[in-house]
Amino acid sequence: MAGVPLLHSCRGGSCGACRATWVSGEVSFPAGPGLGLTDEERAAGQLLLCRAHPRSDVAVAVRSLRPAGEIERRRLPCRVAQWERLSPEVLKLGLKLPAIEPFRWVAGQAIDLILPDGTQRAYSLAAAPTDGPLLELHIARVPDGKATGALFALGGPGALLTIEGPFGGFIPPAAHAAAPLVLVAGGTGYAPLRALLRALIAEGWTRPTRLYFGVRRAAELYADTELRDLAERHPQLHYIPVCEEACSVANVRRGRVHAALLNEEKDVTDVDVYAAGPSPMVAALRTELLARGLSGERFYADAFG
Ligand code: FES
């Protein structure tokens, strides 16, 4: 209400992006405290803002804070300037906003896409602001999904839609130190991590980075070519594709992405982990990495579904 953009993603208590430390005041959790914190973190006074209801004036300490008004949420018309099938299951949209309307966002944020019939869905932005004014979205086909059905059926660029945003965000501005990065994408969870990679490239990216890209079927491995190219051009990037079902693409590991990661990352005590994908994947990964010694402060997540 005050226009202060607090970090958050899932709004359902599973990703931990909205984590804060209680300072004073009365707070209740009518729907439970959420899965995005361990019992130890809760005992240490941490809480998830998306689950907390203030019962008095409340003070909390948050992990990072952008000034109120720096990022302004707006509702704007847009035109589909790019419509491209990245795979049979994933669509890329490039949305063009009116040139006279300023629209500011940061890597890791999302927008709502509003169709002419009023259907509204949230999607993460897949490019960094330094990439230019087109808003890039990666949209996975949902079986019988009203919104994805309509977007896949567009068949090409030209449609006029509406966006509202940006909102959320799970990447704190000062998060980019020197420790190795471990990025974990589940399906189109790659989109916000792509935005992070694009932002890192613009800043002069040197941190050793291991990126796990996990999908269920080979048809969902939509960013494979882009990531192989990127790893060739940036030797600090180690790319690990993982597919649950049998897959004929070269060097793809078989199984679940979090299992592949746990098998590879023996020491997680000095890494920063960014995970984006379905809520169960993010929650399982967080629990297992914290049990292995990762600090909850160094796990950043964007969760959906
Ligand atoms: S746990 Fe609160 S936004 Fe995800």
Image (cartoon, grey):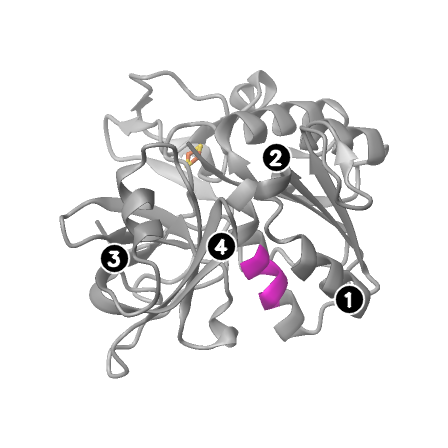
Q: Secondary structure at mark 4?
A: loop
* Label number found at residue 164: 3
* Foreground disc of the pair 4, 2: 2
Name above or below for residue 174 compared with residue 9: below
* Foreground disc of the pair 2, 1: 2
In the image, residue 177 lies at what x, y percent? 70, 58
**Label 4 CA crowd tier, 10 Å (few <14, some 14–19, many 20+):** many
Q: Which residues are magenta?
A: 194-199
Image quarter (top left, top right, bottom left or bottom right) of the C terminus: top left
Mark 4 or mark 2, earlier in chain: 4
Please name the residue shown 51% across and 75% down the image.
Answer: 130
Separation of residues labelled 4 and 3 (CA atoms)? 16 Å
Mark 1 in CB contact with mark 3 (< 8 angstroms): no
Mark 2 or mark 1, earlier in chain: 1
Magenta-drawn stretch contains 197: yes
Q: Secondary structure at mark 2?
A: loop
